[in-house]
Image: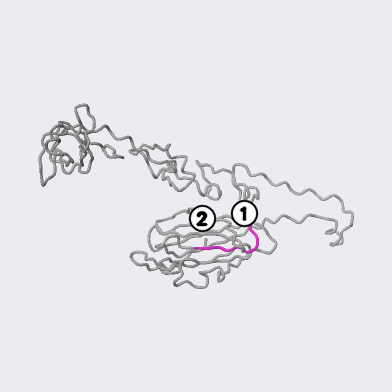
Amino acid sequence: MTRLVFLLVALAACAKTIDQHAHTGPDGFSEGAESIELTGGQGEAVGQVTYPGGDRVDWKVIALPAGRIGQLVLDLEWRAPRDRMDLGLVVYTADGKLLDETIEGRRRSKREGSKDLTIERAQGTIYVLVFATERGDAADYALDVRFVDQTPPAPVTIDSLLATGAFPIPGPPSLGAVPRPCKDTYDPDNPDCVQNPPACDRDNPDKKNPSCKKLCNKDKLDPKNPDCKQFYPVCDPDIKKYDKANPNCDGIEPVRPPPPPPIKGSVMDVTIQNGKTIISISVAKDSPVQRGWAGTLVDDRGNPVTKGEFTVTSIKGRTAMGTVALSYDDANRYAAAVIYFPDGYVAP
């Protein structure tokens, strides 16, 4: 791709919510798309998009040779003023049909990246949208275009022979060369390789082979790369082991274990404070009881007592305190209480 002398976009400290077309030019809309002329099947365009600057999108239009069909390769490279900024690329037909769009790209550095698309059997007029992906994104870019004409030859007919003055009863046509099948090695000059590139050799990847462009780097797994999914472990739904970055966990909800059995305690004291019945409960030294946990007084058989419910209001050492809706005498009838673990509790 043509080397660019980039003019970095000056951005504010943080992106503000602005109109993405506030300062856009005519090429901010498809009607004003900039034309990319093809010479020898190749063309290029450079530009700048900035979401914070109100010039988020640039439209390009490519008029492919009339009556020709082939492979259209779009290669977008950019340089941003800050790290991790991203640009997108979308391709449409003249009647608005979506042909393809970028999902991910290659980042050469924190501020530089690239994306590419290959459109098979492209023909007619093609519209290309270059845009800043998120609200804070901006970059200078270069877009290279390459068109490989793959139009099949017109069939030979008697009428076409007569039009050229050939003998009306021609001899049998000579056999054309049988195209070489594309095997294990990618050959860009072999049409069969262009149409059906071989699988990428992971031990010796060929950068020219389209099948290697999205090859996963096993030393630096990218959860957004579908090819990396096979190198991630099977998803463990246990909440303590659940890894939301693991693409194999997509669609799987983490599972929390059931709460432990209630914590048993002994009622050590009952007092009246401001007309309320306050109970003091002794719990085990290593008990994880916290303020806000619910509990209840229980009878000799361990059954909950009516109006014996309480919420732990304070913890002092091994003593938990709470308020019950019982009288002083009724509360003094019970010597035991239980405190429940809250829903979703996960032991540290």
Q: CA distance from mark 1 to mark 2?
A: 15 Å
How would you classify the magenta stretch by its main secondary structure? strand
Q: Quadrant of residue 20?
A: bottom left
Nearest to the observer: residue 88 or residue 168 = 88
Image marks 1 and 2: residues in contact by CB distance under 8 Å:
no
Residue in the picture at 45% in, 72% down: 23
Q: Is residue 148 magenta?
A: no
252 versus 159 height, above or below: above
Nearest to the observer: residue 1 or residue 100 = 100
Report x, y in % for residue 220.
41, 45
Residue in the picture at 45% in, 48% down: 224
Q: Residue furthest top?
A: 301
Report x, y in % for residue 22.
44, 71
Count of marks placed on residues: 2
Report x, y in % for residue 284.
17, 32
N-terminal of the pair, mark 1 or mark 2, is: 2
Report x, y in % for residue 130.
50, 63
For label 2, the SS is loop
In magenta, the rendered stretch is 119-130
User: Can you identify the residue that label 2 sits on?
Assistant: 102
Left or right: residue 310 compared with residue 213? left
Disc 1 residue type (three-letter): Glu
Q: Which quarter of the rendering shows the C terminus? A: top left
Left or right: residue 338 compared with residue 177? left
User: Can you identify the residue that label 1 sits on?
Assistant: 120
For label 1, the SS is strand
